[in-house]
Amino acid sequence: MEFNAEMVGMYIIPWSIKIITSLAIFIIGKWIAKSITDVAKKLLRKANQDEMLVKFLGGILYSLLFVAVVLAAVDQLGVNVTSLLAILGAAGLAVGLALKDSLSNFASGVMIIIFRPFKIGDFISASGVSGVVDEIGMFCTLLHTGDNQRIIVPNSGVFGSTIVNASALPTRRIDLTIGISYDDNMGKAKEIILDVLSKDERVLADPAPVVAVAELADSSVNLVVRPWVNTADYWAARWDLIEAIKSNLDDAGLTIPYPQQDVYMHNVA
């Protein structure tokens, strides 16, 4: 088939212009959509909105603007957008039924944003995993563990499970169980432990720390040690207190016994 000047003028040039215009609309429109989203995020941050809400709404806004850009680019090619939307609507219904889990994740993400059981930076346990919240997306929540592993949890798994937020309140109680020998003086052990707690500046005076006899176990007398600290100091204070209590009990001659059993041997004639 030979292309003459008339065919070039009637078909090739007009379609080339449409394609180039459509690409320009898509590229420029995508850039504008990103710019509008960035401006909206900045305004939300200036309004002191939670970072979790900023990222979530930003993701939804960009998605809507991107769809509008795609439709504008397709319309430039001469495609009937109204008919296309009708087809997409019917296809969307079928896809929605097939992707009901994804829609459930989206709905759960909206519920997380509304009720705010946690925020970015909180340490949570949910859906069988634990970590620091990095981002709440449209379909999943991103966490990272203490050893810097990425955890991606579907939003429905997070919102549909029991959520433990270790960072929600300003203070936390450290629960320790310290065992001493039955031969040791309980009063002296309690005095030593209370002295260790009083010397640690991270231990709060109110509520006052508690040291009490919890149980008479098989091999030891177990004392519960329950000081309160600021949430940010929890792990560092816990580790330091365990070490300090052990060291001071050793210096005072008090022992933390190993589990033991008494075995009696009888000779049978």
Image (spheres, rainbow, N blue to C red):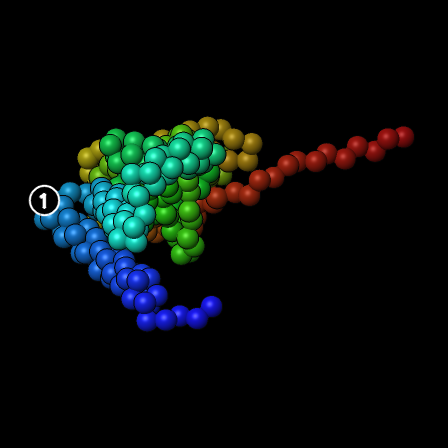
Q: Residue at x 30, y 31 (%)?
A: 111
Q: Residue at x 38, y 51 (%)?
A: 144
Q: Where residue 196 sits: x, y (%)? A: 30, 46
Residue 192 sits in quarter = top left
Please name whichever residue, 32 or 152, is drawn nearer the observer in this view of the structure.
Answer: 32
Please name whichever residue, 188 or 86, is drawn nearer the observer in this view of the structure.
Answer: 86
Q: Residue at x 17, y 49 (%)?
A: 41
Q: Where residue 257 sits: x, y (%)? A: 52, 42
User: Which residue is label 1 attached to?
Assistant: 47
* Residue 156 visible in the current orientation: no
Q: In this picture, is 136 found above or below 110?
A: below
Q: In this picture, is 26 found above or below 93?
A: below
Question: Would you say 96 lies left or right of 135 here?
Answer: right
Q: Where residue 68 sits: x, y (%)? A: 25, 46
Q: Residue at x 34, y 41 (%)?
A: 84
Question: Would you say 180 lies left or right of 239 here?
Answer: right
Going by the picture, which residue comes out furthest to the top? 215
Q: Where residue 57 sits: x, y (%)? A: 23, 42
Question: Would you say 196 lies left or right of 161 here?
Answer: left
Quadrant location of the C terminus in the rendered image: top right
Please name whichever residue, 124 or 20, is drawn nearer the observer in this view of the structure.
Answer: 20
Q: Residues within 10 Å of mark 1 (few under 14, many from 20)?
A: few
Amino acid type of disc 1?
A: Ala
